Structures are given as C-alpha cells and as structure tokens.
Image: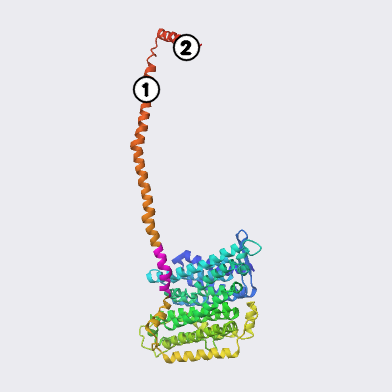
C-alpha cells in the first residue's frame, strides 16, 4: 500500500526533475513522456482514492515523513492528476517544437507532483516541503518566457506575495511544536493534531494557517498576485488556477476545519473573508476588459466560495465546488489560450465573434461559462447550493453574501459569452486551432455536465461518507430554484446590457478594473516601508558602519606607523646598545688570551691572591 502512495508522488516529481536535467535534448520526447507520466499518475490516484494508503519514511528523530490518502485528499489527488492530464494534452498540441518543451513539461510535472505532496501530507513539515516546491515552480512557470522583463516581474510579484503569506505556516509549525500537544515532542505537528493545542499556541497556529491559506488561494487582501500570474502561458494559468496552487489554500482550510472551530474565531474570519472575496472579486471580474484577467478575478471569487464553505464547516459543498470549479476553469483558460494563439489577442473587444470562428472551442467555452454562471443543470450550480446551505445554517447574512457572489458570477460569465458570440468580424489572419488542442476542451465540457450528479442524493451522501463529513446541511428545493432563478435573471440582464459602460463614477470603475488598488496598497503599506527601511539600513551601513570600519583601519595604520617610527626605533637602539656592550666585553675578554704560559701563570697567581684577600677580609 505504501508503495502505491510513494509511486503517486515520486513519478511526476522524478520525471519532472529528469526532463529539467536533460534539457533541450529531450524537447522532442518531452510531451510524450509527460503525457505517459500524467496518465499513469491518474491511474495511481484513482487506485489510491479507493484504497486509502499510507506511507512513512525516516526523516527527523521522532518525526518521520508521513503521507496519507483519505477521502478528501483522495478526491483532490484524482482532480489534480485529471486536470494535469487534460492541460498537458492541450499543451502537447499547442506548444511549438521551437519552444523549450522539456523545461516546460518538466516544470509542469514538478508542479503537479508538489501539489500531490501537499494534499497527501500528514504533517506540517511535509506539507511545507510540497508548499515551497509548488511556489518555486509556479514562479518558474509564470516567468517561463523569461526574456520578457514584464513576465519575470509578474512572476516575482506572484512569488513574493505568496511567499510572504507562506511565513504563516512557519509560524504555525513553530507554535505547534512549542505547544507540545501529543505523546511525543513532534506529534503536535500532525495536521490532525493541530486542534489539540492549548492557548495561546492554538491562536498562533490558527492565524498562521489562515494567513498562509488566504495568500496561496489569492483571497483578500492577497488577491492581486493572481492578476500578475496571467503573464504566464495559458496552460500554466489553466493548471495553476483550477486544481493546483490556488486551491491549495482552500484545501488546507477544509482539511483543518477542526482547528478553525477549536480556535473560536478562525471559522468566522475564514467564512467572512471568503464571502467578501466572492463579492468584491466578482465586481472586479465584471470590470475587466481582458479575458484572462476576467477569468483570474473569477478564480478568486469562486475560491471564495470554497473558503466560505471551510469557514461554515460545509466540507462536502466546498469539495464539490473545488472539483467542479477545476473542470470549468481549466476549460475556460485553455479556450482563452487557444484564441490567444489563433487570434493574437485576449482583449474582449477584439474577441468579438471568436466562438463563431471556432465553433467547437466556442461551444466548450460556453458550457464552462454557463457552469461558472451557476445555471442548471451544470455542476457549479448545484455544488454552490450545497455549500450555501451550510452558510444559511450559520448565518442568513453569510447566505445573502454568497447569493450576491453567485449573482455576480452569472454577470461576468454572461459578459464573456456576449463578446465571444457576437456577430463575427473578418479575420483573414486567424490561425487554425490544432485538433489535438480541441479534444481536451471537449472532455472538460463533458466533465462540467457530469459533475452535477455528485451534488444530489444518493451520490452526495456517498461523498459525505467518503469525506467523513457527517451531519452536513442539505439544500432544499427552493434554494436550488432561487439560485438558478437569480443566476438566470442576472445572465439575461448582463447579455441585454452588452458592452455599454456601467453608470458608475470613473474612480469606482477604475478601482475595480485595477483590482481594488490592492497592489498599490501593498506597495504603500509593505513594499515602500520595506524599501525605505532597506535604504536606511544601507545608509547606516555606508555612513556609520563603513566609516567606523574605515576609521578603525586608519587608526590601526597610524598606530603601526607610530610604532614603526618611535617604538621600533627605541627597541632597535636598545638592541644595538646591548650588542655594542657585548662586543666591548668580548674585546676585553680576548686581551688576556695571548697564548703564552708564563702570562697565564701570572694571571692565576693574581687571581688566587685576590681570592685569598677576599677570604681573609670576609672572615
């Protein structure tokens, strides 16, 4: 059983590293290798989801490396590997032979493998390993076209923002270790044991986990980094925004639901943050004129529903939302990438009639957009109502905020559809979309339809049993009807409104179009003070520390010169005088040494005479 789990995580990680090491020499073989690995990983994930294996290996004294698959991580592993396979199928047909394909497919496999480590981790240290590798590979993938300074700058912004929030996990790990909850000193680092910590460590652990999760999932106030991540290739956006990195935070909150509940405040903070993100980032999505930016903002909003579900304890609804969103959002980003390649633009006004030019892509895009809008009988409609039932049980205000977010989902989805289905304009320079890039979109479209089934009994009850989520609130028929009716009215209204500007103040519209000014606020509140502090530290280093060091060196040199001029001269003089005296004594000592015997006898007589006189006088 453990071999199955080790193979699940080691296969994509090992293949990804191998492709990166071999480099351009593997460009031709890279797509085939990556597809074979992704398909094998999907088979392993499905098997693991049924068998629930565990694995353990020595790591630190008293702290082994532990991986485990339960109901939640099993569903996530299948989702991650399935979406990875679809995205790689599209990439194999879309990426030209002139690209560094070994580097791209290697990074994609490494990225997916690190997500698998994240979802199967049983302890915080293992989770951190997957978390960190996932962040590093996302930086490399967003900046894949590294010769473009704007892309590398966007990758830096995304990485540094998430990296700042990731420090929360280190805070949580330190607090968990300090709490010492558990039979051994390290057992408190188990994800299942975090809720057993005592105060104040429990609050520190909760705060660290919440901050790290909100940052990774681009929730308020960290949402702006997802806008920058759009600079990466479309397949990267499709994988990153659907089933991997951006949903990792939501997964962590769903996983640590007992911790949020035990803290007494974490669940409310998480629920309201998710609801606020769903509403405000929905408004941001409506204000966008770039298709990928619209989809990025919608990702923040849709993940807000998952975060809301974690806050109210609606684990089943949050998981169904995560899986359904992965299918829809990966399809939307891949279709946007296909149009970008074919038409050379992702601006909505320039995409007029794009769905008419490429009917199959347009139809698949429409299925995903209608699912995102929450229209029946598609997957996100039902999944959203399952989680909103939990919000209604917690607070009618949370439910109202969730409904508002769902209504906005219909508006921005209808807006995107309005542009791509308008009467076509002549496009003589449009490129043909490869057939190999179309079939993955069709598969994802079927998934958007099929995934509505788990939101209804008896399959929903089976999902709850798999997730060990008993006592989950079930939506009533009127809740399904209300959300569907509101979504339909909002979509029809948005379609009828078309491209006319909204009757809002220019400052309000620009604020939403600029992602609420969150990036500027981050620069004002965090980046600018940090840079000022760095400049002050540099000035202190130059003006105080450097001068002190230079002054110390100068004083040392002067002391050395004085020593050379004064002390050394005195010492040399003393040594010279001693030597001169020694030479004089030597000359005096040589005078009696004549070599004549009678002189030696006379000297001996004189010496004995003096000695006798001394003896007489002493007595």
Of residues 99 and 191, the one nearer the viewer is 191
Q: Are marks 1 and 2 in contact (CB under 8 Å)?
A: no
Which residue in the structure is indicated by mark 2?
614
Residue at the right extreme?
Answer: 183
Residue 427: name its quadrant: bottom left
Q: Residue 296: where, in percent of width, then height?
A: 46, 78
Q: Residue 350: where, in percent of width, then height?
A: 37, 84
Magenta segment: does it hold 96?
no
In this picture, residue 19 sits left or right of residue 558: right
Which residue in the structure is indicated by mark 1?
583
Q: Residue at x 52, y 88 (%)?
A: 375
Q: Magenta region: which residues? A: 518-533
The secondary element bearing badge 2 is classed as helix
Majority SS type along the magenta span:
helix
Of residues 458 and 445, the one nearer the viewer is 458
Magenta segment: does it hold 519?
yes
Marked residue nearer the N-terminal end (1 or 2):
1
In this picture, residue 469 sits left or right of residue 143: right
Mark 2: give few (<14), some (14-19) or many (20+) Cα within 10 Å.
few
Residue 29 seen in the figure: no
The secondary element bearing badge 1 is classed as helix
Q: Residue at x 39, y 64 (%)?
A: 532
Separation (CA) of disc 1 from disc 2: 30 Å
| Disc number lying in front (1 or 2) | 2
Q: Residue 332: where, in percent of width, then height?
A: 47, 81
Q: Give the vertical position of 555 relative to 233 (above or below).
A: above
Of residues 67 and 519, the one nearer the viewer is 519
């Amino acid at each position: 059983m453990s071999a199955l789990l080790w193979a699940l995580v080691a296969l994509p990680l090992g293949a990804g590293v191998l492709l990166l090491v071999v480099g351009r020499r593997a460009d031709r073989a890279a797509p085939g290798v990556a597809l074979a690995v992704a398909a094998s990983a999907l088979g392993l994930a499905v098997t693991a989801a049924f068998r629930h294996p565990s694995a353990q290996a020595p790591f630190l004294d008293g702290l082994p490396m532990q991986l485990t698959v339960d109901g939640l991580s099993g569903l996530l592993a299948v989702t991650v590997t399935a979406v990875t396979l679809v995205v790689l199928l599209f990439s194999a047909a879309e990426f030209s032979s002139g690209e560094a394909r070994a580097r791209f497919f290697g990074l994609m496999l490494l990225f997916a493998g690190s997500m698998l480590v994240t979802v199967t981790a049983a302890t915080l240290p293992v989770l951190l390993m997957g978390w960190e590798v996932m962040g590093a590979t996302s930086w490399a993938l967003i900046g894949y076209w590294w010769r473009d300074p704007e892309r590398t700058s966007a990758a830096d912004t995304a990485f540094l923002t998430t990296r700042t929030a990731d420090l929360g996990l280190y805070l949580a790990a330190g607090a968990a270790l300090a709490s010492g909850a558990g039979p051994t000193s390290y057992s408190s680092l188990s994800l299942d044991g975090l809720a057993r910590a005592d105060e104040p460590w429990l609050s520190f652990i909760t705060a660290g986990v919440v901050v790290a999760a909100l940052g990774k999932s681009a929730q308020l106030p960290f949402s702006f980094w997802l806008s920058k991540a759009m600079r990466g290739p479309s397949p990267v956006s499709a994988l990153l925004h659907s089933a991997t990195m951006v949903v990792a935070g939501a997964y962590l909150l769903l996983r640590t639901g007992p911790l949020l509940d035990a803290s007494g405040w974490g669940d409310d903070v998480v629920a309201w943050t998710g609801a606020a993100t769903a509403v405000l980032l929905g408004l941001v999505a409506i204000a966008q004129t770039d298709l990928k930016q619209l989809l990025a903002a919608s990702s923040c909003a849709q993940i807000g529903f998952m975060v809301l579900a974690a806050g109210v304890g609606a684990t089943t609804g949050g998981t169904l939302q995560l899986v359904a969103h992965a299918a829809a959002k990966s399809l939307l980003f891949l279709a946007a990438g296909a149009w970008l390649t074919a038409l050379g633009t992702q601006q909505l006004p320039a995409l007029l009639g794009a769905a008419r030019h490429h009917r199959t892509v347009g139809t698949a895009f429409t299925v995903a957009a209608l699912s995102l809008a929450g229209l029946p009988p598609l997957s996100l409609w039902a999944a959203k109502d399952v989680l909103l039932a939990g919000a209604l049980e917690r607070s009618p205000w949370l439910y109202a905020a969730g409904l508002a977010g769902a209504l906005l989902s219909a508006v921005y989805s209808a807006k995107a559809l309005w542009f791509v289905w308008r009467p076509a304009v002549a496009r003589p320079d449009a490129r043909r979309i490869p057939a190999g890039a179309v079939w993955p979109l069709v598969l994802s479209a079927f998934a958007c339809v099929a995934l509505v089934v788990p939101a209804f009994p008896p399959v929903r009850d089976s999902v709850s049993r798999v997730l060990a989520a008993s006592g989950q609130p079930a939506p009533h028929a009127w809740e399904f009807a209300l959300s569907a009716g509101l979504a339909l009215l909002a979509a029809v209204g948005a379609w009828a409104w078309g491209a006319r500007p909204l009757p809002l103040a220019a400052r309000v519209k620009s604020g939403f179009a600029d992602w609420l000014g969150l990036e500027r606020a981050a620069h004002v509140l965090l980046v600018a003070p940090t840079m000022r502090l760095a400049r002050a530290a540099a000035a202190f280093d130059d003006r105080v520390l450097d001068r002190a060091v230079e002054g110390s060196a100068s004083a040392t040199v002067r002391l050395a010169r004085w020593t050379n001029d004064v002390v050394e001269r005195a010492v040399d003089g003393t040594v010279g005088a001693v030597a001169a005296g020694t030479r004089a004594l030597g000359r005096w000592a040589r005078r009696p040494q004549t070599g004549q015997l009678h002189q030696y006898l006379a000297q001996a007589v004189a010496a004995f005479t003096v000695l006798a006189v001394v003896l007489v006088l002493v007595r």
